[in-house]
């Protein structure tokens, strides 16, 4: 069977995005070519990752599992930064100390973070995602030493997932192309992208037991494109971490 379609896949940990769309043939009429190009364009738009929160969603999925740590670091009055630069410097010092502790223990260290200051009477604070190693709470509390910390385990389900976390971490950023309000440690994994030709009868279907997040099909007399976004059926978990808050 002729390979007249294209398939594109983005895999970021348990998060998968797929699309199939028709390619133009040498004998297609101008009308058929125009229709297929429109379908191809729509498919590519679904797969394009233009905005900061979209990029962060894929990066979080590539690096973290349920049970990893969502950490909020706040400052008490005594340690409150006077500027973004000072807040970033304080977080960098914390990050360096945590990295050294993990390295000494032979443990991996992956961290994503932002630097926020809510308008009005807001205070500087940081939202972080850190890979869990077991009993992390006491270590993080000791190394931070600037104020309160709050830790919750990462959830990946219909209500809470990589997308909701990414949007939350990017909530202060304006939605402009190419703008990024978050950073991450060296060595973080990147999503895998692959594009290849497939047979003309190829369709998309999420594996059994997967959690489908979004599914779209658009069909014309000259072909169709499909798009599907889902979470894999069997997602490993890190060590369970209870919600805790303390100064």
Image (cartoon, rainbow, N blue to C red):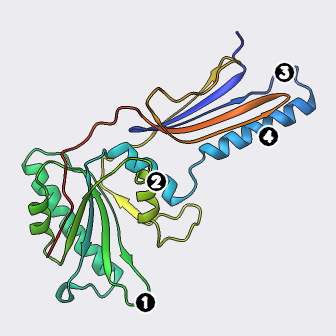
Residues under labels 4 and 3: Cα distance? Answer: 17 Å
Q: Do the residues labelled 3 and 1 touch (CB within 8 Å)?
A: no
Instruction: Choose top left, top right, bottom left or bottom right for residue 196.
Output: top right
Find numbered disc 4 in the image and state the secondary structure of the residue it sits on.
helix
Q: Could you tell whether 239 is left or right of 202 in the image?
A: left
Instruction: Choose top left, top right, bottom left or bottom right for residue 9.
Output: top right
Q: Which residue carries the number 3 mark?
A: 26
Pick whichever, 193 or 159, lies toward us: 159
Residue 26, how many percent across, how many down?
84, 21
Q: Residue at x 38, y 90 (%)?
A: 121
Local crowd size for mark 4, using a 10 Å CA cut-off: few (<14), some (14–19), many (≥20):
some
> Is residue 132 depicted above or below 15 in this figure?
below
Local crowd size for mark 2, using a 10 Å CA cut-off: few (<14), some (14–19), many (≥20):
some
Residues under labels 4 and 1: Cα distance? Answer: 46 Å
Q: Sequence order check: which comes first, mark 3 or mark 1? A: 3
Q: Which residue carries the number 2 mark?
A: 163
Q: Which residue carries the number 4 mark?
A: 38
Q: Which residue carries the number 1 mark?
A: 120
Residue 239, how many percent across, how many down?
18, 45
Q: Sequence order check: which comes first, mark 4 or mark 3? A: 3
Q: Quadrant of the N terminus?
A: top right
Find numbered disc 3 in the image and state the secondary structure of the residue it sits on.
loop
């Amino acid at each position: 069977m002729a390979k007249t379609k294209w398939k594109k896949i983005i895999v970021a940990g348990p998060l998968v995005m797929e699309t199939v769309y028709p390619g133009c043939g040498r004998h297609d009429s101008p009308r058929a070519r125009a229709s297929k190009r429109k379908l191809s364009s729509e498919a590519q738009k679904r797969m394009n990752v233009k905005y900061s929160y979209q990029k962060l969603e894929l990066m979080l999925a590539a690096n973290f599992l349920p049970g990893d740590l969502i950490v909020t670091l706040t400052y008490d009055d005594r340690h409150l930064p006077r500027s973004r630069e000072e807040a970033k410097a304080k977080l960098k010092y914390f990050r360096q100390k945590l990295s050294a502790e993990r390295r000494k223990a032979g443990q991996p260290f992956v961290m994503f973070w932002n630097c926020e200051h809510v308008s009005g009477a807001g205070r500087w604070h940081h939202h972080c995602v850190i890979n869990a190693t077991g009993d992390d709470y006491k270590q993080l509390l000791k190394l931070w030493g600037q104020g309160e910390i709050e830790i919750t385990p990462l959830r990946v389900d219909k209500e809470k997932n990589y997308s909701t976390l990414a949007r939350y971490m990017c909530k202060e950023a304006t939605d402009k192309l190419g703008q990024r309000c978050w950073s991450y440690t060296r060595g973080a994994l990147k999503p895998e992208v692959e594009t290849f030709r497939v047979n003309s009868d190829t369709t998309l279907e999420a594996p059994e037991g997967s959690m489908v997040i979004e599914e779209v099909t658009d069909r014309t007399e000259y072909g169709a494109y499909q798009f599907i976004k889902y979470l894999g059926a069997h997602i490993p978990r890190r060590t369970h971490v209870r919600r805790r808050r303390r100064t």
